[in-house]
Amino acid sequence: MKYDICVIGGAGHVGLPLGVAFANANKRTVLLDINKKTLDTIQSGTFPFREEGGDGALKKALKSGTLFMTTDESVISQSKYLIIVIGTPIDKYLNPDFSGLMKILKLHSNHFRDGQVLILRSTVYPGTSHYVQKFFADKKKKVRVVFCPERIVQGYALRELKELPQIIAGFDTKAVRLASNLFKALTKKIVTVSDPMEAELAKLFSNTWRYIKFAVANQFYMIACEQGLNYHQIHNAMTKDYDRNKDLPRPGFAAGPCLFKDTMQLSAFNNNNFFLGHSAMLINEGLPNYIIQQIKHSLRRGNNDRDFKFMTIGILGMAFKAESDDSRDSLSYKLRKIAEIEVNTVICHDVYIKDPSFVSIGELISKSDVIILGTPHKEYLKIKPANYPEKLFIDIWNVWDTKILQIKK
Ligand SMILES: NC(=O)c1ccc[n+]([C@@H]2O[C@H](COP(=O)([O-])OP(=O)(O)OC[C@H]3O[C@@H](n4cnc5c(N)ncnc54)[C@H](O)[C@@H]3O)[C@@H](O)[C@H]2O)c1
C-alpha cells in the first residue's frame, strides 16, 4: 500500500490535526477532501483554522514527506487504514442527516479493498457502525469496520490526541487489534468496548452530558437574574473549596457544531423521548433571547428616557467559543438576529473571524448604547467597562466587573 492512512474529510477541524499527528508519528498519511481550496492552504503550510501548535506541526509533517493531500478518491484503494471524519449534521427537523456518509459509501465503494481497516471517527447515530459493516458484508468485501470516536476539544487537538484515551470498538478482535496498533502511535491509553454501538453511545452521551451541564448553569443563571441576584457570587459560594460542585460550569453560550446536534442525535435515537436533552436545548438556545429581553425590560424599569428600539447594540465576539475562529452554530449570530428585530442598529466585532461587515472594537464601543459580550476572547478582557459609565455592558460570562454588569431588576 502506498499510504498507511487515508483520512477522508482530512481538511476538516478533526481530520486535519489527526492527519498531521499521524504524519508526524511517521505514518504515510494522505488527506482526502472535496475542498480543494482548503487543501491548497494546507499544502502551503498554513492551518486553515486556529489550532494550537498547528502551523509548526503541519510544516514539520510536510517537510518530513509523510503528509499528502488530494481530492482524488482513488487514494482510498492505496491505503491500509481509512479514517472517515466528515461532518455528521442534523437536518432542519433535528433528525440525523446520513447523506454525507452514504455518499462516500455509495460513490467510492469500488475503491475499498479486502483487508483494509475502515475507522469511523465522526460522531455518529448509534447503529451506524453496524450499518457500514453490513454494507461491506453485503458487497462481499472483507473491510474491517471499527468505531474510534474523536474526543478532542476543538482547537487543541494536537495536544489532546496524545493525552486522551482512545476508545476503540470493532466487530472482531483482529480489527480492534489493528486499530489499537494504529492509535498507539499517538497515545498509550486505549479503552476497548465490545459492541461498537456502546462506543457510539459513549461519544454521544459525553457530548450530551456536557450540553446538559451547560444548560444547568444557564438555567441557574436565569433563576438568579429573575430575582435580581448576582449568580456569579452564588456560583463562587457553591464551588469555593467544595469539590462536589466543582464541575458546575459558569453560564455562557453552549454553542458550536457538536453539542446541540449530538444531543438531538441522541434524542432521535431514543424516539424523541428525551426530556433532559430537549430541556437543555430550550435553555441553551433560549439564552440569546433571554438576554435581549432582560436588557429591554431592565431599561424600561430604569425609566430610561431613550427608546430601546432606537438604540445601537454592539456584539463583541461572533465565534462559537473563546479563542476560536469558528462561526459554526455560534449563538452570537442568533443573538444578532434577535437584536435586529428589537433595535435599529446592531454592529459586531470578532478578534479572529474576518467579515467586512464587522467594525473595530473602538468603533463598536463608541457607537453602541449596549455592548454584549458574545464570546469571551482574551482580547476583550482588556476593555474596562468602568471607563464608559454611560454605556450598558452585558457579560453573562463574568469576565469583566460583575458589579457593573449584572442585569438587575
Ligand atoms: N469539531 C470538533 O471539535 C469535533 C470533535 C469531536 C468530534 N467531531 C465530529 O467529527 C466530525 C467532523 O467534524 P469537523 O468539525 O471536523 O467537520 P468539518 O466540516 O470541519 O470537516 C469535515 C470535512 O469533510 C470534508 N468532506 C465532506 N464530504 C466529503 C467527502 N465526500 N469526501 C471527502 N471529504 C469530505 C469537508 O470538506 C470538510 O473538510 C463530525 O462528526 C463531528 O461531530 C468534531
Image: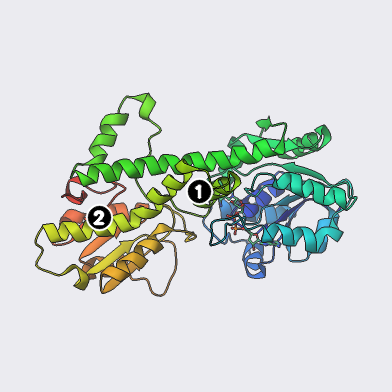
As drawn, is 136 to the left or to the right of 164? right
How packed mark 2 is, by other alpha carbons closer than 10 Å (few <14, some 14-19, many 20 or more), is: many
Q: Nearer the viewer, residue 45 or 174?
A: 174
Q: In which quarter of the image is ligand 1?
A: bottom right
The way the protein has been coloured in the rendering is rainbow
For the residues labelled 1 and 2, say whether their Cβ atoms are less than 8 Å apart: no
Residue 6 x %, y %: 76, 53
Residue annotated with mark 1? 259
As drawn, is 180 to the left or to the right of 243? right
Q: Label 2 sits on what residue type? A: Ile
Residue 94 x %, y %: 54, 56
As drawn, is 71 to the left or to the right of 369? right
Q: Label 1 sits on what residue type? A: Leu
Disc assigned to residue 394:
2
Q: Which residue is drawn at 25% across and 55% down?
A: 394
Q: Which of 86 and 341 is in front in this view?
A: 341
| Visible residue check, residue 26 | no
Q: Which residue is drawn at 79% across and 34% down?
A: 177
Q: Mark 1 near ligand 1 (CB under 8 Å)?
A: no
Residue 335 x %, y %: 35, 61
- Please identify, in this view, whether the residue under mark 1 or under mark 2 is nearer the observer: 1
- Against 165, residue 79 (above or below) is below
Residue 176 x %, y %: 77, 35
How packed mark 1 is, by other alpha carbons closer than 10 Å (few <14, some 14-19, many 20 or more), is: many
